């Protein structure tokens, strides 16, 4: 101010400086009230004052996506089983994906709540919006929409540089995996997500896309539920060449013994029964690429087993 009022500072220069200051103040005000609008996976336009700085995650995969997008430092609460990455383990819990503490959510004054369209209660988004909260619903349904989710969350949190870098690396790795495994011979695969009762996946599940990438054909693609219940008899009739168990009971003997006893089934005859920890394949996050590599490796081992057994018969 002393400069503007000092002797010899002519009116033109004074007006110029005042104009620059006015523009600067206008820009600062615009930044303070900047808005970002993003289309979420439910097809709803979500508008926030960006960047958001208090985020609540309503699903484990959402928590992982937020950290991948660089928004981890702004997550103030999450749900049970949000155990990756390590810092997420210490976050306050507001229930689990299907049973949420609404009062606790509101009391935390979030700028943004990120929900799970198919995993949270059906009316949760509308209920939270009615309480004045910004809600973004996340539901990556394909391997290619995972990086899109990361980028959208990065834009909302103002961490788009990190998000775009992570998304780009994901896309490049996925491209390499598709190229490397695209000419593999096809195998019939039964993917088991629980052993008692027996649940599997249909063709709409993202893991079916993973199987296809690796040269595997899901034997239960035609069933209607995305995670259908099946019987032992149905599995035997489908006669898979490979069984992959991806549930939390890795060392429980029933599920392996159950299939090994059926020597007439190809998977048992060839010794193609594998276990995969579900966290790296069941969550729609960048970690799924580790699951892709594991499943592709299993199928390569299965092909070698089949060739070896057939060669000696």
Image (spheres, grey):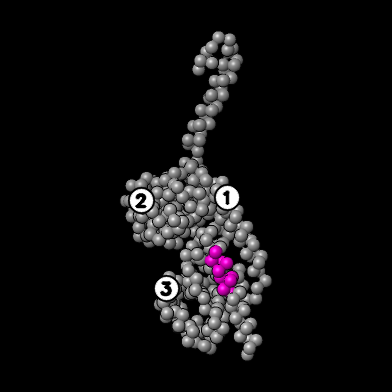
- Residue numbers of the magenta segment: 290-299
Is there any visible trace of residue 43 in the rendered image? no
Q: Which residue is mark 2?
A: 105
Q: Which residue is mark 3?
A: 249
Specify whether residue 50 is painted magenta.
no
Measure the alpha-carbon separation of dots 1 and 2: 29 Å
Can you give x and y, in whole percent of width and height, for residue 186 in the image? 63, 76
As drawn, which residue projects farthest toward the left? 103
Q: Which residue is mark 1?
A: 164
Q: Residues within 10 Å of mark 1 (few under 14, many from 20)?
A: many
165, 56: nearer the viewer: 165
Identity of the residue drawn at 56% across and 16% down:
14
Identity of the residue drawn at 53% across and 68% down:
207
Query: Depth-wise, is mark 1 or mark 2 nearer the camera?
Result: 1
Q: Residues within 10 Å of mark 3 (few under 14, many from 20)?
A: some
As drawn, which residue projects farthest toward the top? 7
Query: Depth-wise, is mark 3 or mark 2 nearer the camera?
Result: 3
Q: Earlier in the sequence, mark 3 or mark 1?
A: 1
Quarter of the figure with residue 289 = bottom right
Can you give x and y, in whole percent of width and height, for residue 91 in the image? 39, 53
Looking at the picture, does residue 122 appear above or below residue 16? Answer: below
Can you give x and y, in whole percent of width and height, for residue 203 in the image? 54, 71
């Amino acid at each position: 101010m002393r400069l503007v009022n000092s002797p010899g500072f002519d009116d033109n220069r004074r007006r110029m400086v005042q104009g620059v200051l006015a523009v600067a103040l206008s820009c600062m005000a615009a930044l303070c009230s900047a808005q970002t609008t993003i289309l979420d996976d439910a097809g709803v336009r979500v508008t926030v004052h960006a960047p958001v700085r208090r985020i609540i995650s309503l699903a484990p995969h959402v928590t992982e996506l937020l950290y991948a997008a660089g928004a981890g430092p702004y997550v103030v609460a999450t749900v049970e089983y949000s155990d990756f990455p390590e810092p997420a383990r210490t976050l306050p819990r507001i229930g689990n994906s299907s049973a949420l503490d609404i009062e606790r959510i509101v009391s935390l004054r979030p700028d943004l709540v990120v929900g799970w369209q198919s995993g949270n209660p059906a009316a949760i988004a509308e209920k939270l919006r009615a309480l004045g909260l910004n809600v973004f619903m996340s539901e990556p349904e394909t391997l290619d929409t995972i990086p899109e989710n990361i980028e959208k969350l990065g834009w909302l949190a103002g961490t788009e540089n990190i998000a775009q870098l992570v998304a780009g690396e994901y896309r490049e790795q996925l491209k390499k995996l598709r190229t490397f495994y695209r000419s593999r011979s096809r195998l019939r695969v039964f993917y088991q997500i629980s052993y008692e009762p027996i649940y599997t996946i249909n063709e709409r599940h993202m893991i079916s896309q993973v199987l296809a990438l690796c040269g595997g054909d899901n034997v239960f693609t035609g069933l209607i539920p995305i995670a259908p219940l099946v019987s032992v008899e149905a599995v035997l009739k489908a006669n898979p060449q490979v069984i992959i168990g991806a549930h939390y009971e890795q060392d429980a003997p029933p599920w392996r013994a159950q299939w090994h006893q059926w020597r007439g089934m190809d998977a048992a005859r060839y010794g193609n029964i594998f276990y995969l920890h579900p966290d790296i394949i069941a969550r729609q996050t960048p970690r799924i690429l580790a699951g892709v590599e594991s499943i592709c490796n299993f199928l390569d081992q299965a092909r070698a087993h089949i060739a070896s057994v057939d060669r000696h018969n």
